[in-house]
Amino acid sequence: MVTTTHTILKRYANGFSLAELLIVITIVGILGSIALPQYFNQVKKTRQNQAAASLSQIQTTIAAFVDEIGLLPTSWRDLNNITPLMTPDGPANQTNFEWIPLASNNCSKANKSNCYEIKATQENQIFTLQARAADQDALTYNVVACLDLRTGSSDLRKGSHSKETSVADLRCVRNK
């Protein structure tokens, strides 16, 4: 029996069967359920790393302020005079070290859910910095850091998917 091109084309002209479509949709669904959570966790880690880099820069700025001015900084405005510290609203001009949003990728005045907020405290020449995600689903991806101006030691810790980190975990703070 000779099969012609017309017969072959006629056999495949009807498209996929329902069973074939269901199998493909199931496979795509399984792959999506595995890949999407991993993707979103990676996005959270990327934002956390950006916040960690900002805290590291702020540690350096605090040390530069003390070296240049000879006094301890008392506000974000003081630090902004040494190195620009940007928020979605512009330069950080707050006259204290309370929570402010950090300017970062996809963080804007209109959409602050992609932002990290930072806060600083100072006690006995030890500065403690905290960064937390504005997104409630990423709260465990926090960042804490410290700088001991008496010894020059510093530390930085990041939370993970399963556990938030704490100021008590920092070496500078434990050595008070």
Image (cartoon, grey):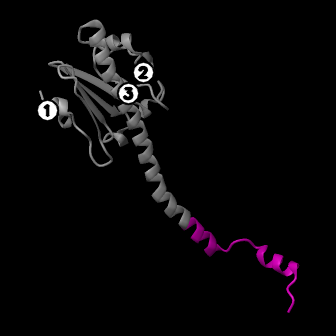
Residue 21 position within the rendered picture, expressed as x and y whole percent measured from the top left? 62, 69
Q: Which segment did they paint magenta?
A: 1-26
**SS assignment at label 2:** strand
Q: Is residue 69 above or below residue 137?
A: above
Counting residues from the start of the chain, the first of labels 1 and 2 encountered is: 2
Q: Quadrant of residue 15?
A: bottom right
Spatial CA span between label 2 and label 3: 11 Å
Q: Residues within 10 Å of mark 3 (few under 14, many from 20)?
A: some
Question: Which residue matches tag 1?
Answer: 174
Residue 64 position within the rendered picture, expressed as x and y whole percent measured from the top left? 31, 15
Magenta stretch encompasses residue 135: no
**SS assignment at label 3:** helix
Q: Is residue 165 above or below residue 38?
A: above
Question: Which residue matches tag 3?
Answer: 54
Q: Is residue 102 above or below residue 5?
A: above
Quadrant assignment for the C terminus: top left
Quadrant assignment for the N terminus: bottom right
Question: Which residue matches tag 2?
Answer: 87
The amino acid pointed to by label 1 is Arg
The amino acid pointed to by label 2 is Thr
Spatial CA span between label 1 and label 2: 31 Å
**Residue 151 versus residue 96: which sits nearer the camera?**
151
**SS assignment at label 1:** helix
Viewer-nearest of discs 1 and 2:
1
